[in-house]
Image: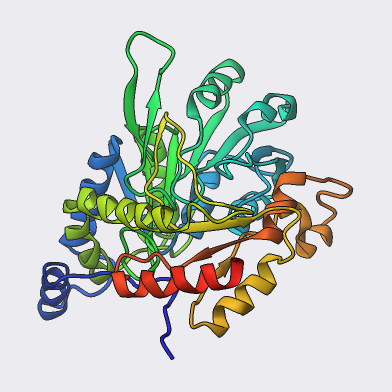
Amino acid sequence: MTWVPVNEPLLTEEDFAPLEDAFRTGWISSAGRYVDEFEQRWAEYCGQAHGVAVSNGTVALQVAVEALGIGAGDEVIMPSYTIVSCALAAVRVGAKPVLVDCCPRTFNMRVDQIEARITPATKAIMVVHMFGHPVDMDPVLSLAEKYGLAIIEDAAEVHGAKYLSGRNSNSPEWRVCGGMGHIATFSFFANKLITTGEGGMLLTSDDHLAKRCRDLRNLCFRPDRRFLHTELGHQFRLTNMQAAVGVNQVKRIEEIVERKRKIAATYTARLTDLSGVQLPMEENWGHSVFWVYPLLLADNHSLDAVSLAAALKAEGVETRPFFLGMHEQPAFHDMGLFSGESYPVSERIARKGLYIPSGLAITDEQMDHVCAAVRKILT
């Protein structure tokens, strides 16, 4: 039986050459020129001054929260509909995640709910760009300025995505996601547009924040005496070999984005006539990279995401479920968080949504198979 994996990365011989060089020259740990090159190239592309490579996207969020000085008693506003890493970064330092619901069109956080959640304890807004589509950033930037809040921009899923900033002004401009927050975080996991297998990065244009991030990722070694510690950090370094895998992908990021958009366009053209299914949308102020291709079943559809996933698996199609909202996570309930809270859109899409294979290496024949399977089950 044909089997279509939910994601398969697409790496080239050009991507392999720096990895081979790192290996053959012996620069295999966290020192080496490819770490610096990867940081510089990605920061420059996203419009930030500094890049700080780390071991994965989850620890990037943790370092961002710590670098901003967020701690016990502080609050961080974020979407309920996101990966657990976001809330985890706050609770790890004793801060409280404060949640908002998500938009039913893009699945991004409801920016119109943020202001009502701001209190004197609020220190930051954690923006999470979801599934390749940017959050509507202008209202968030305005709120951050109004209340003196930091913006942590989780751009793990939006490599190369762009947002039309200032669209109601006389000088609108397209800005790259990851270039709008005080500090931004990325993941380079195998299913991301740019991958180093595992890996992550923080971006900022603040010199002090950049230094704090570098210190925190590297055990807070002091420059005057390496093994004297006046504060505690982490070992969150990225290896030179991992960075070597990423450097050339940055060079061809626009080609990668074009490929992802073509995959999404192919699916949309073939599935757009299906009833009872919401396909991914793109607002006119966003340039999505369609990191994944989500299907959302109508509320009254006879199937839910679990049964649809099982039926597609039987047809040789691997899928992944949508996130379960932070407010529905038992681990956080055990900590006394989110008691009695409800976020209806997050709850609905968690039960009715999944995404189908759309990795960069997917072939036309595999997409044919996926579309035939989806149509067989849903028509």
The colour scheme applied to this rendered structure is rainbow
- Rendering quarter of residue 220: bottom left
Q: Residue at x 28, y 67 (%)?
A: 30
Of 119 and 317, the residue lying toward us: 317
Q: Quadrant of the C terminus?
A: bottom right
Left or right, 313 with reference to 55: right
Q: In which quarter of the image is the N terminus?
A: bottom left
- Rendering quarter of residue 199: bottom left
Of 134 and 236, the residue lying toward us: 134
Q: Residue at x 40, y 66 (%)?
A: 191
Whether residue 354 is visible to the viewer of this picture, yes or no, is: yes
Whether residue 231 is visible to the viewer of this picture, yes or no, is: no
Of 210 and 82, the residue lying toward us: 82
Left or right, 275 with reference to 269: right
x and y percentages locating residue 77 in the rendered image: 66, 37
Residue positioned most to the top: 170
Q: Which residue is drawn at 68% across and 47% down?
A: 80
x and y percentages locating residue 303 in the rendered image: 71, 67
